[in-house]
Image: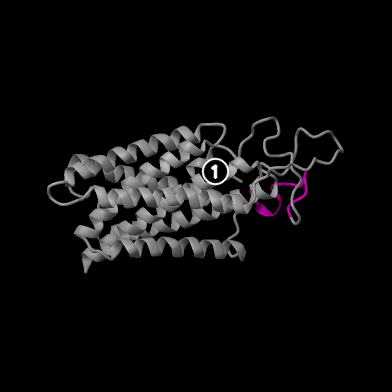
């Protein structure tokens, strides 16, 4: 199963050292090796079989496998770096009339650096913790300036509402996933990917119209359409979370190496940033309409 998150979509967890995450025996309750990965409509799992094991021989137990504690710890570190970067940017890069252009310029530069770092990590064979934390720091600077501007010019309560909304989406999707109210199947994956590509294409077209025609382009970022597309963006973010949870669950069940918990933290952080930005934009539109 491959997540729609850009970090997870290129591949499953690390396939280095000739085992591709396959050499660990599944934990209790996990599908047996060699089981049909397409059974009951489920998506193929990159960890479900061991193509390197001798025929008829059981897969040896693997030490140093990723656990949920590893994922939680690395995710907390990555998100903590985002929050720290945002707090410093909020305090040191004011968005008043005298400093607005300078702060915006730094924020855009930080966003571009974060984007480049995310691409570099996405194409590396192994997760690089320093690279992931650097991405988180620059992403935090961008979020801090944007959040400060929203708080200053739209409403001081909007940022906290967006943070709480993001936390609620995360908790709700996690609960729904654990209770199996959300079942990540091939059909679910295909629908989310198609919807995400359509959504991003519309946003790019809207941006081009805004850049060359002025205003809000096609109106996807304000008014009724802005509210509708804000809700769609948040729902897509929630679907990304479900796909990421499935990827992490599979990695743990089939013995992905512990270092891959950094990749899981990276992907989850990117998804939460997506949800926060969409939540912030939606609440800003709603506050502006009051």
Mark 1 Cα-neighbour bin, 10 Å: few <14, some 14–19, many ≥20: many
Residue 164 horizontal/vertical position (percent): 39, 64
* Dominant SS type (magenta): loop
Left or right of 233: which side holds 251? right
Left or right of 18: which side holds 126? left
Residue 20 forms part of the magenta stretch: no
Left or right of 124: which side holds 150? left
Outermost residue on the right side: it is 56
Residue 213 lies, with reference to residue 180, above or below; the image says above
Name the element at disc 1.
helix
Residue 151 lies, with reference to residue 125, above or below; the image says below
Q: Which residues are magenta?
A: 30-43
In this orientation, which residue lies closer to the viewer: 208 or 278?
Answer: 278
Is residue 121 at least partly visible in the picture? yes
Q: Which residue is mark 1?
A: 262
Residue 241 horizontal/vertical position (percent): 51, 54
Which residue shows up at 47% across the image and 40% down it?
132
Which residue shows up at 48% across the image and 35% down it?
121
Which residue shows up at 38% across the image and 56% down it?
276
Residue 33 forms part of the magenta stretch: yes
In this orientation, which residue lies closer to the viewer: 66 or 47?
Answer: 66
Which residue shows up at 76% across the image and 47% down it?
35
Residue 67 horizontal/vertical position (percent): 64, 50
Q: Quadrant of residue 176?
A: bottom right
């Amino acid at each position: 199963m491959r997540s729609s998150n850009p970090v997870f979509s290129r591949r499953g967890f690390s396939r280095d050292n000739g085992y591709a995450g396959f050499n660990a025996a599944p934990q209790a309750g996990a599908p047996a090796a060699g089981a049909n990965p397409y059974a009951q409509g489920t998506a193929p799992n990159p960890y479900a079989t061991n193509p390197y094991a001798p025929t008829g021989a059981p897969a040896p137990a693997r030490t140093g496998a990723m656990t949920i504690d590893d994922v939680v710890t690395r995710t907390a570190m990555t998100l903590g770096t985002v929050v720290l970067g945002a707090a410093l940017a909020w305090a040191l890069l004011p968005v008043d009339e005298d400093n607005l252009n300078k702060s915006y310029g730094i924020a855009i530069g930080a966003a571009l650096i974060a984007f480049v770092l995310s691409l570099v990590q996405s194409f590396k064979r192994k997760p690089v913790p320093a690279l992931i934390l650097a991405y988180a720091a620059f992403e935090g600077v961008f979020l801090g300036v944007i959040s400060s501007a929203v708080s200053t010019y739209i409403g001081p309560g909007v940022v906290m509402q967006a943070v709480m909304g993001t936390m609620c989406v995360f908790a709700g999707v996690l609960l729904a996933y654990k209770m199996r109210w959300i079942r990540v199947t091939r059909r679910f994956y295909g629908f989310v990917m198609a919807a995400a590509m359509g959504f991003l294409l519309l946003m790019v077209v809207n941006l081009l119209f805004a850049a060359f025609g002025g205003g809000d382009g096609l109106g996807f970022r304000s008014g009724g359409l802005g509210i509708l597309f804000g809700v769609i963006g948040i729902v897509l973010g929630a679907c990304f979370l479900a796909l990421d949870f499935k990827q992490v669950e599979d990695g743990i069940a089939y013995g992905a190496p512990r270092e891959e918990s950094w990749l899981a933290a990276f992907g989850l952080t990117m998804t939460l940033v997506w949800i926060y930005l969409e939540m912030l934009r939606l609440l800003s539109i709603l506050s502006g309409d009051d």
